[in-house]
Amino acid sequence: MQISVNGKLYTVDAEQDTPLLWVLRDHLGLTGTKYGCGIGACGSCTILLNGEAVRSCLTAFGRAEGEEITTIESISNDNKHPVQQIWEELQVPQCGYCQSGQIMSAIALLRETDEPSDEDIDQAMSGVLCRCGTYPRIRQAIKVVASRLASRGEGK
């Protein structure tokens, strides 16, 4: 089956019910998407499927046919994506394991909402667990990114 990942078309020989997480990591070598729990509870494996944040550990490979998959690897070659820059500037991560899922979820939120409220952020980010508890910094970072994008006229 062929799938589009980060703007490239790949032919992958895997069972239709294989979790997309393992296709990305094991078949394509895209290891930025992390395995956390395998049951969709932690969100470390979050990717974008047609711009929507989804858990790749729960998304069957067969569902990806004809869809556009975006992983953390494609958002910036040099960590210059606005979300990555603010994440670094505000020192959001501690252990960092959940951060690819956090960043992908934040990107999806900011594509939908120019000025997210605390409630918007909490709702959008609630599916990605941070064992270090950096939620206040995550919320602050999203607000800073939204503000900077708005000031540059780069909102939704």
Image (cartoon, rainbow, N blue to C red):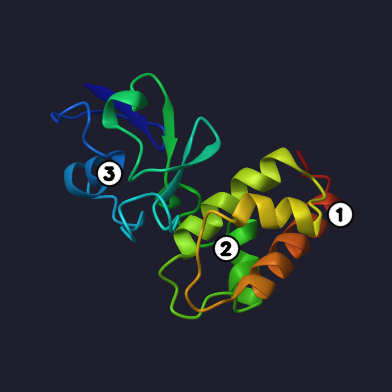
Where does residue 13 sit, x and y in percent of width and height? 13, 29
On screen, residue 31 above or below 2: below
Cα–Cα gap, marks 1 and 2: 18 Å
Cα–Cα gap, marks 3 and 2: 21 Å
N-terminal label among 3 and 2:
3
Instruction: Tell me the element at label 2.
Output: helix
- Tell me, yes or no, whether the two marked residues, 1 and 3, touch with CB atoms within 8 Å: no
Name which residue type carries label 1. Answer: Ser
Q: Is residue 67 left or right of residue 144?
A: left
Name which residue type carries label 3. Answer: Leu
Cα–Cα gap, marks 1 and 3: 36 Å
Depth order, front residue of 137/37: 37
N-terminal label among 1 and 3:
3
Which residue is tagged 2? 84
Residue at 18% from the left image edge and 48% from the top image edge:
26
For the N terminus, give its image quadrant: top left
- Tell me, yes or no, whether the two marked residues, 1 and 2, touch with CB atoms within 8 Å: no
Q: Residues within 10 Å of mark 3 (few under 14, many from 20)?
A: many
**Image disc number at residue 118:** none
Which residue is tagged 3? 24
Depth order, front residue of 44/77: 44
Q: Count numbered badges in the picture.
A: 3
Where does residue 82 sit, x and y in percent of width and height? 65, 58
Depth order, front residue of 11/40: 40
Q: Residues within 10 Å of mark 1 (few under 14, many from 20)?
A: few
Residue at 46% from the left image edge and 59% from the top image edge:
100
Which residue is tagged 1? 151
